[in-house]
Every structure is written in C-alpha cells, then in structure tokens.
Image: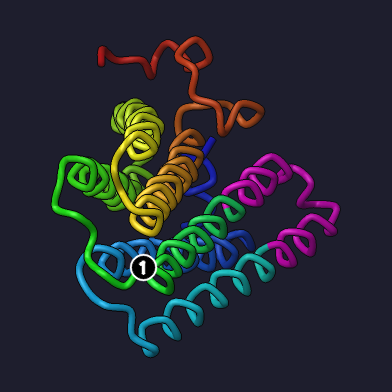
C-alpha cells in the first residue's frame, strides 16, 4: 500500500504536494526524538532547548492540520475519489507522526523534575539500549519507506516488538528496584515514552507489509506470505 502512495508522492499528481508536507513532518519528528534522547541522557535542559522542542512540536501539529485540510480538499473533487484508500492511509500515518512529536516532548519534560544524571547501572543500561533500538529503527524508516523494502520493514517490526516487550520487563524491574521516587519515575516514564515512540514507528512500518485495513497490526498470521522471512 505504501509503495503506491510513495509513487504518487513523487509524481505531478496533486497528492505530491501533500506528500512533501508528510516527508517534512516525519523529518521534524525524527529530529525531535533524537534531540529529546540527547537531552534526557547526555545534557542538561536549557530554556533555549525547551523552546526549540516546543516550536518544532507546534510545526508538526500545524503540518498535520494542513495535510488533513489538503486531503479533504483533494477528495472533494469527484475525479479524485479513486485516491480514497491512499488518503485514508495518509491520515493514519500523519497521526502516528504527530504522536511521536508529543512523546518526544514528554521525554524532554522529564528533565523538568529530574535534573540529575540517571544511575550507571544495569537498569539504565537497558533503557539506553532501548533508546538506541528505537532511534535506529527511526533512522532506517526513511530508507525503508522510500524503497518500500518489505523484508527490511518486517525485520524492523520484529525487532520493534521485541523492544516493546523489553520495555514492559524494564518497568517491572524498576518497580522492584531500590530507586528513590524521582529516579524511578524518570526511568519508568522514559521507558514508556520510548515504547510509544517505537510503537508509532512500527505503525508506519506496518503500512509497507500490511493491507490498509490491517495497518497498525503486526501479527505474523496477517502478514502476506510473500513478505515473510525467517527471523
């Protein structure tokens, strides 16, 4: 499904302009997620950094509204009704991108109550590995999207599902740890936000290997046989 949509984006079709806005939106969301991770793990939150995060989140929200408006306008022309499936997919994808921006902002807001460094222990090491996995998936998403690489998309989906399970385990382990309240809260929130960012990346990846009515679902039985590879 996404392959055909990307093809339309690259054409002179009216949807091509909408596609440019979607690509811009996705690029901003990716930069938000990367910057947010750096602030949580590597540097202090400055007023300028927080302002930048909020400004970029506003840009993402405005692009979402613009794309929705453009899609509605496009579909109001009777000759464009055949584009309805692609427009439905696009509306679904922009919502995922918008949510990534929100969770990136939430990550940064952890620094408003937790200003110290996270502990150098196994729990935080696991959180850093989860962060790395989510960021690598996001980085790979652009190439996978442009090439509609079904096999790579499926591999990333499997890895993302494994990361989600690791997030759940980490939350349980933090609850059983000796962390003080602030450290436990910061670690659990970061874990949950990375799980949600990863989940929305998976939703976008699912559009490469799933039919429209099953986008956002990743169960192996629903994946077309021609896309399946050995884990």
6 sits to left or right of 231: right
Please check the rendered image and state whether residue 85 is part of the magenta-colored stretch, yes or no. Answer: yes
Question: Hey, which quadrant is residue 19 in on the image?
Answer: bottom right
Residue 159, percent from left and from top? 30, 30
78 sits to left or right of 228: right
Taking depth in this image into account, of 108 and 9 the one nearest to the observer is 108
Q: Does 76 appear above or below 113?
A: above
Q: What kind of element bears circle 1?
A: loop
The magenta stretch is 68-93
Determine which residue is flagged by label 1.
114
- Image quadrant in which the N terminus is located: top right
Residue 90, percent from left and from top? 61, 50
Q: Does 163 appear above or below 135?
A: above
Taking depth in this image into account, of 219 and 54 the one nearest to the observer is 54
- Image quadrant in which the C terminus is located: top left
Q: Residue furthest bottom?
A: 48
Q: What residue is shown at x 55% (from left), y 50% (from top)?
A: 96
Dominant SS type (magenta): helix
Residue 108, percent from left and from top? 40, 68
Q: What residue is shown at x 61% (from left), y 26% (from top)?
A: 214
Please check the rendered image and state whether residue 34 is part of the magenta-colored stretch, yes or no. Answer: no
Classify 10 Å Cα crowding around label 1: few (below 14), some (14-19), many (20 and above). Answer: some
Q: Does 68 appear above or below 177?
A: below
């Amino acid at each position: 499904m996404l392959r055909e949509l990307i093809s339309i984006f690259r054409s002179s079709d009216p949807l091509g302009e909408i596609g440019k806005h979607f690509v811009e939106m996705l690029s901003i969301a990716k930069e938000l997620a990367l910057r947010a991770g750096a602030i949580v793990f590597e540097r202090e939150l400055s007023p300028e950094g927080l302002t930048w995060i909020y400004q970029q989140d506003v840009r993402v929200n405005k692009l979402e509204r613009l794309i929705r408006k453009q899609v509605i306008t496009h579909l109001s022309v009777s000759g464009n009704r055949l584009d309805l499936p692609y427009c439905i997919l696009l509306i679904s994808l922009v919502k995922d991108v918008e949510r990534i921006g929100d969770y990136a902002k939430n990550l940064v807001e952890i620094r408003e109550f937790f200003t110290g460094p996270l502990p150098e222990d196994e729990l935080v090491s696991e959180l850093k590995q989860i962060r790395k996995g989510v960021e690598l998936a996001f980085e790979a998403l652009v190439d996978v999207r442009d090439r509609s690489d079904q096999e790579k998309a499926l591999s990333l989906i499997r890895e993302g599902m494994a990361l989600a399970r690791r997030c759940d385990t980490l939350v349980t382990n933090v609850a059983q740890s000796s962390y003080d309240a602030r450290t436990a809260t910061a670690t659990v929130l970061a874990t949950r936000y990375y799980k949600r960012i990863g989940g929305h990346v998976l939703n976008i990846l699912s559009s490469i290997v799933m039919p429209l009515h099953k986008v956002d679902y990743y169960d192996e039985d629903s994946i077309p046989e021609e896309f399946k590879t050995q884990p």
